[in-house]
Amino acid sequence: MTDVAHAPLRYDAAGSTQEREHRMAPTAGTQSQDPVIDVRGLTKTYATGFQALKGIDLSIRRGEIFALLGPNGAGKTTLISIICGIVNASSGSVTADGHDIVHDYRAARAKIGLVPQELSTDAFESVWATVKFSRGLFGKPRDDAYLEKVLRDLSLWDKKDSKIMALSGGMKRRVLIAKALSHEPTILFLDEPTAGVDVELRHDMWEMVRRLRENGTTIILTTHYIEEAEDMADRIGVINKGELVLVEDKATLMRKLGKKQLTLTLQAPLERIPDDLAEYPLELTEDGHSLVYTFDVQAQETGITALLRRLTQHGIDFKDLHSSESSLEDIFVSLVRQNREARA
């Protein structure tokens, strides 16, 4: 990946430590309905005939954290690479902060920073030299204090004079982030940024992402750690086999597609569910020791009260119960499965 893929982003290291729940929640008032990235009818077909993207339409709002989820080979990296000017589209259009990525490519790329998947760096350069070079690619004025702040926040300052080839994999990942931040872009792409990195770096990165977002930077991330998307994102996009399956506000998605389950631990195991309880979505688990009832969280009536009454009438007693809701991972797996079945 070349440095041309990286571009300016405003970064502010200030920020106070808060409770995890508050930090994970989207910050109200930071988003605008104005799309900072607008993708229309985007397709990509390679010379082999493989169609990586199939008519993608996507608008990303200014100041949001947008998580793009999908299995391996779904088209996530291809989509990001086209927006960042690394791969040419077969058809369609993309604008970045109002600039067409083809006809006004210099201005468009100047708005974008990219942290790629691959650990591709200038092995024989020092950390300081490669970060300064990345900043200079777009004609940004020298600002050693700013670059020092970035390196300190990434725990790289004591490595500033080290050659990149001598760094660990986690440290090289930090250098990629510093390069992407060096030009102060307004749009930041994070393509699987925490894949294979240590817990400390993952924590540092998400702290930085929150601060960037608070200062108006738009963040687009792909990740295999779906719990990160669940914690961080304002909106979720799911892509599978080159098609955008859905784009939805995270809270709305969880509410619409999530399900809730009530698990009853029985006093005595059941061999089977009585026939006249067939109207209820019940399932026996743990060799008949537990009864699971699945219900719609949006329904006016959950049916739990009536179910418990019917169980009592059948002499089915329970000693414990607990409820659980779908995670984003459950929803993602379900959506991909449904998309695969629809195509079969």
Image (cartoon, grey):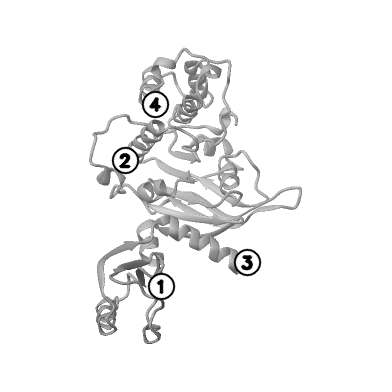
Foreground label between 4 and 1: 1
In the rendered image, residue 81, in percent from the top left (x then y), is placed at 59, 42
Q: Quadrant of the C terminus?
A: bottom right
Q: Tell me the CA gap for discs 3 and 4.
A: 44 Å
Image marks 1 and 2: residues in contact by CB distance under 8 Å: no
Q: Mark 1 packing: few (<14 Cα in 10 Å), some, or many (20+)?
A: some
Q: Tell me the CA gap for discs 4 and 2.
A: 18 Å
In the rendered image, residue 259, in percent from the top left (x then y), is placed at 37, 66
Q: Which residue is mark 2?
A: 214
Q: Which residue is mark 3?
A: 343
* Name of the residue lying farthest toward the bottom: 276
* Name of the residue lying farthest toward the right: 48
Question: Which of the two discs, 2 and 3, labels the residue nearer the N terminus?
Answer: 2
- Label 1 amino acid? Glu
Q: Residue at x 60, y 29 (%)?
A: 2
The dot on residue 154 is 4
- As displayed, is residue 329 above or below residue 113? below
User: Is residue 140 at all visible to an observer of this figure?
Assistant: yes
Q: Quadrant of the N terminus?
A: top right
Foreground label between 3 and 1: 1
208 sits to left or right of 88: left
- As displayed, is residue 74 above or below residue 343? above
User: Is residue 65 at all visible to an observer of this figure?
Assistant: no
Q: Residue at x 50, y 51 (%)?
A: 69
Q: Which residue is mark 1?
A: 283
- As displayed, is residue 46 above or below residue 268? above
* Name of the residue lying farthest toward the top: 161
